[in-house]
Image: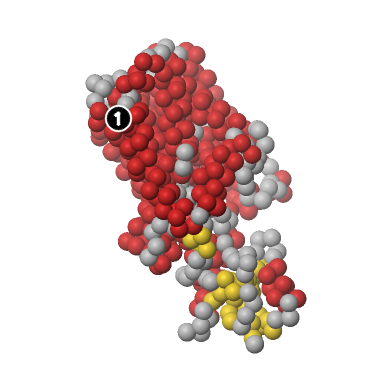
Amino acid sequence: MNQSIPFGRGLALILILDAALLFSVIGRAPLSRIDEGQIAEVAREMVTGRDWLTPRIGGVTFPAYPPLAYWLLAASGSCFGFSEFAMRLPTALAGLALIAVSAQIARRLAGDAAGLTVAGMLATLPAFFVQSGVCRADILTMAFATAAFDRFLAWAEGEKKIRDLAFMYLFTALGILTKGPLAVAMLGLGGLAWFLLRRQWKLLLEMKLWIGIPAALLIVVPWYLAMYKINGWAFINENLFLENLDAYTRGYQQKRGRFFYFSQVHFLLPWLLVLPLAWKVRRSPGVALSLAWFGLVALFFTASSAKRVNYLAYWCPSLALSAGTIFAAVCAEAPQLLKRGFLALGGLAAAGGGVVAALPAGVWTGDNVSKIAAQLPTIGLVAAAAGAVIAGIAWRRGPQAAGLGMAGVLVAALFVYGFLVNVRVNPENGVLADFCRQAARKVPAGETLYVPAPEGAEGLVHFYAGAALPLRAGDPGYYLAGQSQQERLVKDGRNVQILDSMLDHRGRSRYLLRVHP
């Protein structure tokens, strides 16, 4: 956010600071039951089972995603051990790469100051920070899609080098291998925004689509053909059609209301608040294209029937590009307007923090917020102080210094969240992880730990038990079982002995069982 810093040095500093922030927190919390536990277990079984083609959980085919994210996690686990840190490391590295690519796009469109501003804003967006610290495929996919868009811009607005087109198609293919056609959609929306604004439709004929598309398919199709040959049409149908087309049109397994993302808008603050200033600098370089890309991405996901908070990862690069180019332009053209904005924002933060500090703990009844209700008065006071400091910086030093102050406050807040708060918000994951480790240790040497058929167990159970737990239909042996599975075994007349048990956050039991002959 400071023009006096050389671009390369400033970007390196941002990346080093963000790496230090991410690497300090990604190993703190246990994996989540949904997505993280599944993806990590698939990666672990690829290594232990020596089958790098078919994704499996507990030896059972798991057709949810293409393989590249699994391969990267498997490589990380092979190097560093299958820990929380190792499973989240590829996503964190992809997040750093995405910051660098987004900064380069902004630099090309609007100059060095905009590039550094975009990098700082993307690194401190709460949605981006959270998604950069989990082992999901979204940040990886968006990194490839954004890199492809960067190469398209380098070609379209540069010397029309074939090399740039080649990299665009390569990154697109890698994005498809990470999470399917969604990578094409993200690149396509960026390209559509460019063509709508530039109106150079004839360039479509120069993109060598008849060469690039087949070349990308040569990278992508072999894995799908292998899966069809090994696992049949059902695998392809779920992986390619149900998880993508059906999810978009009918919300396969994750249907949410039309206005779901409005309830998640706080993850895009505070930089989302910069966008209304676009009216003042709408003709400045990079502003219109960035806003158009962000608008198309927002419309695309709002129109989808499948909505999840982790999909905000796809919003973040275009939002940071929009906010960063606007911020840099307003700093140059109307700094007093930005100064008044920071004064207002600091005042609102101070007032809001004071209200939060004054409210009794019993007011906070939500599932997650109630877990940190006792700490909210302190958090409110700190937020109020931070708001007052930002307003003071804006008053005395101007909007650029206030922007840096805001980024500093966000870095501190994100560190506290990742290092302290996140572990407390979902303690049930840690309890389950400890129980699975303990249960695996209690099984005598030479015996196998099973899960009841046909349901089996989620990926998290296998991951923390340290083995792919085979399915078994109640025959004698040791089992990790949920409450309904234990009850069914008893109902079926099995001679069940409970060796250990735990209660999850919903009051349901999990058991280490031994079924006797």
Q: Which element is circle 1 on?
A: helix
Residue 134 visible in this rendered orientation of the protein: no
Residue 238: horizontal and vertical position, in percent?
Answer: 55, 49
Left or right: residue 110 compared with residue 232:
left
Image quarter of the N terminus: top left
Residue at 25% over, 28% down: 162
The residue pinned by badge 1 equals 165
Residue at 63% over, 67% down: 454
User: Is the residue marked by circle 1 packed among few (<14), some (14-19), or many (20+) residues within 10 Å?
Assistant: many
Residue 196: horizontal and vertical position, in percent?
Answer: 45, 16
Residue at 42% over, 46% down: 178
Residue at 66% over, 61% down: 505
Residue 472: horizontal and vertical position, in percent?
Answer: 59, 74
498 or 44: nearer the viewer: 44
55 or 77: nearer the viewer: 55
User: Tag 1: residue type?
Assistant: Leu
Q: Is residue 272 above or below residue 434?
A: above
